[in-house]
């Protein structure tokens, strides 16, 4: 069953009984890594096309990795049971409350 995420105003949430805190400030390296992981991956003309299901799995994988790169102690594997919709909600919260991480081209727009 997909796990629900409830984030308090300070940026603390729990996954599988472990609390994590979204920091207020990030290093340039964390910001760069976060943005790179959320960049859309373009289709290559004549290359392999992903099905909608494969694209959703890829999107969830990258959202887990992006969260793990900015939240201390969080591993992408800790978010395996979190649904794509909940991962998207986590990143929307981040963009609304940590503006230095907001991205222009939302990878959530086509979800």
Image (cartoon, rainbow, N blue to C red):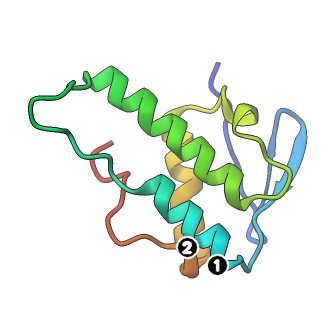
State the quadrant of the N terminus: top right
Q: Local crowd at mark 2 within 10 Å, few (<14), some, or many (≥20)?
A: some
Quarter holding residue 24:
bottom right
Front residue of 5 and 74: 74
Position of residue 67 measured from the top left corner of the image (x, y, whole percent): 64, 52
Tell me the distance, in whole angstroms, between the alpha carbons under discs 1 and 2.
Answer: 10 Å
Residue, far right:
18
**Place of residue 22 in the rendered image (x, y in percent of width and height, measured from the top left):** 75, 64
What is the secondary structure assignment of the residue under circle 2?
helix
Do tag 1 and tag 2 residues touch (Cβ < 8 Å)? Answer: no
Q: Position of residue 76 (x, y in %)?
A: 69, 39
Compare marks 1 and 2 and give the one earlier in the sequence: 1
Q: Which element carries disc 1, helix, strand or loop?
A: helix
Above/below status of 97 relative to 87: below
| Mark number displayed over residue 101 | 2
- Circle 1 residue: 28
Write the residue at 73% across / 70% down. 9
Q: Residue, x 35% and y 60% (percent of image)?
A: 106
Q: Residue at x 72, y 31 (%)?
A: 77
- Choose top left, top right, bottom left or bottom right for residue 51: top left
Direction left: furthest residue: 46
Mark 1 or 2, which is nearer the eye? Answer: 1
**Left-right relation of 36 to 11:** left
Q: Pointer 1: residues within 10 angstroms few (<14), some, or many (20+)? A: few
The answer to whether residue 14 is left or right of residue 61 is right
Residue visible at 50% across and 36% down in the picture: 60
Q: Quadrant of the C terminus?
A: top left
């Amino acid at each position: 069953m997909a796990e629900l995420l409830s984030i308090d105003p300070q940026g603390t949430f729990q996954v599988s009984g472990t609390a994590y805190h979204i920091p207020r400030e990030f290093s340039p390296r964390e910001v760069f890594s976060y943005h790179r992981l959320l960049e859309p991956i373009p289709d290559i003309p004549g290359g392999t096309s992903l099905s909608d299901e494969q694209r959703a799995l890829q999107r969830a994988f990258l959202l887990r990795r992006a969260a793990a790169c900015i939240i201390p102690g969080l591993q992408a594997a800790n978010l395996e049971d979190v649904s794509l919709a909940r991962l998207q909600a986590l990143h929307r919260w981040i963009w609304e409350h940590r503006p230095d991480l907001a991205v222009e081209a939302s990878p959530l727009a086509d979800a």
